Structure formats: C-alpha cells, structure tokens
Image (tube, rainbow, N blue to C red):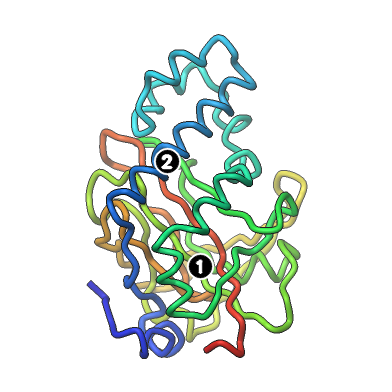
C-alpha cells in the first residue's frame, strides 16, 4: 500500500504517485455510513416508486442491482439525487476520519459542486457488469475548468474517494500514477444540459493501476490525477462516497 508519513503526503500527491492511502474508516464509521447510504437510497426510490419502499428496505445496498428491472437507473441515481442530505453531511463532518484529514491538511471543507448545499458529499452506486455505471478516465480539474463549482481563491483542491461496499480489492478505483505531472488533452461535449470533458484514453499509452484498497480504506488524490472506476466484475454492487476537499493554502 502507498502509505507514507503525514509530513510528506503533499509531496507524494504533488510530486510523487499523485495519491496517498493514509486514512481508514473505523468499523463504527463504516457501518454508520452504510446505514446513511441505505436510508438515503430507500428514500430516493420511494419518491419515484412508493410501492417499492418495503422491498428496498429489505434489500441490502450491495444487492440493489437486483431491483434494476424495477427502477429507472438514470432517473433515480443522478448525481444531484445522490448528494447526502444536510443532516448526514453534518454528521459525517464530525467523524474521526475527518479529524484525521483536518490534522493532515488543516481544517478541510467539502466543496459545493452542484450548488445544492454549502458542502456536498455524495455516494456512487456501480452495478455488476454495467459499463455505463463507471466513469471513464479523467482529471477532476477538467470539470472545474468547464464551470462545475466555484473555487475560493485561497484554497486548492484534493479529492477523497472511499469504498463503502467493495467486494474485492482491485475492484474499486483505477488511477494512472504520476499523471498529475503530465498534460493530457480532452475534448468537451454537452450532456445532461452542461459541458463535460471527453477523454480518449486509447490516444495514450497509459499505465493504469487498479488500487488495492478495501471497504473503508480511502484514496486521497491530486486534482489532475487521471482516474476512473474499475469495471465491476463481481456479484455485488460497489458503493462508494467521495467529495472534493478545499484546503486552505495557508494551512499547509
């Protein structure tokens, strides 16, 4: 694992591999976030399909793909819908793993990317065998460059991604180590009413690495690191949480 001492983590993110694996959720934190995601998912489905509420309550989150034929995936699981309610975000911000982030970076704040809440933390749901559920390789900076979110001048961005249900190591996030130090070109296209970057990874010879972190083991990475989701080849759904961290320049 790419675990390093706290005093050198920014060097590793900026000048090294582009990511670190220093923060791990406790069992209590992992279980509580699992409860939040399941509760939120049941609430979302119930808004569109009230008759499915009881069935959703009885279905574990990592088996929600078994309900796919009953649910319009694209309509229900939009990014806006998957942003946690404010009360859940407030609870997450008080968890010990966030204290670890504050120790490493100074007080961190979750970015406002979708103009829904002041701080936004969201979860992602990837069904088995569904290519359309995973994001292609990209750098987060490209989205910000296209106008997704407003960036405070006194901060810089880092991303944290945490698998919450991940059946097998190497079935979560894939990255291109050191890619934050190179320049890659991307096109843009309008999708779902806004501009989004388009990157053809076949134009480059990329050394793509599936990370070996398991449920509860976070990845913190550079804003320009190429990354994307692994194809879910397992029998269970993969569920993760993520947010963009705004870090005060003066704190590091």
Residue 199, image x, y percentages: 56, 63
Q: Quadrant of residue 169?
A: bottom left
- Residue name at image x 73 percent, y 49 percent: 116
**Is 129 located above or below residue 136 in the figure?**
above
Q: Which of 190 and 20 is in front in this view?
A: 20
* Extreme residue toward the top, this view: 51
- Secondary structure at numbered mark 1: strand
Residue 159: give its label: 1
Q: Which numbered disc, 1 or 2, marks the residue closer to the eye?
A: 1
Mark 1 neighbour class, 10 Å CA radius: few under 14, some 14 to 19, many 20 or more? many
Question: Which of the two labelled residues, at mark 1 and mark 2, occupies the earlier sequence position?
Answer: 2
**Is 86 located above or below residue 2 in the figure?**
above
- Residue name at image x 61 percent, y 69 percent: 186
- Residue name at image x 51 percent, y 67 percent: 159
Q: Which of 10 and 15 is in front in this view?
A: 10
Cα distance in 3D space between marks 1 and 2: 19 Å
Mark 2 neighbour class, 10 Å CA radius: few under 14, some 14 to 19, many 20 or more? many
Q: In which quarter of the image is residue 107?
A: bottom right
User: Disc 2 designates what residue?
Assistant: 126
Residue 111: give its label: none
- Residue name at image x 46 percent, y 51 percent: 241
Residue 143, image x, y percentages: 65, 64
Residue 67, image x, y percentages: 43, 20
- Secondary structure at numbered mark 2: strand
């Amino acid at each position: 694992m790419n675990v390093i001492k706290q005093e050198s983590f920014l060097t590793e993110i900026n000048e090294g591999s582009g990511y670190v694996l220093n923060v791990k959720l406790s069992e209590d934190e992992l279980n509580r976030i699992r409860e939040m995601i399941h509760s939120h998912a049941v609430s979302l489905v119930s808004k569109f399909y009230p008759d499915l509420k009881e069935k959703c309550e009885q279905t574990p989150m990592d088996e929600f793909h078994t309900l796919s034929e009953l649910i319009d995936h694209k309509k229900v699981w939009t990014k806006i819908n998957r942003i946690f309610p404010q009360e859940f975000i407030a609870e997450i911000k008080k968890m010990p793993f966030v204290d670890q982030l504050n120790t490493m970076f100074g007080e961190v704040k979750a970015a406002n990317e979708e103009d829904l809440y002041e701080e936004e933390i969201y979860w992602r749901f990837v069904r088995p065998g569904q290519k359309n559920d995973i994001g292609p390789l990209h750098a987060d900076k490209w989205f910000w460059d296209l106008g997704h979110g407003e960036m405070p001048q006194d901060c810089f961005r880092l991303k944290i991604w945490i698998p919450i249900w991940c059946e097998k190591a190497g079935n979560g996030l894939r990255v291109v180590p050191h890619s934050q130090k190179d320049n890659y070109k991307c096109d843009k296209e309008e999708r779902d009413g806004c501009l989004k970057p388009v990157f053809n990874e076949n134009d480059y010879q990329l050394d793509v690495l599936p990370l070996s972190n398991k449920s509860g083991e976070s990845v913190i990475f550079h804003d320009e690191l190429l990354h994307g989701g692994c194809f879910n080849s397992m029998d269970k759904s993969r569920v993760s949480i993520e947010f963009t961290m705004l870090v005060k320049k003066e704190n590091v």
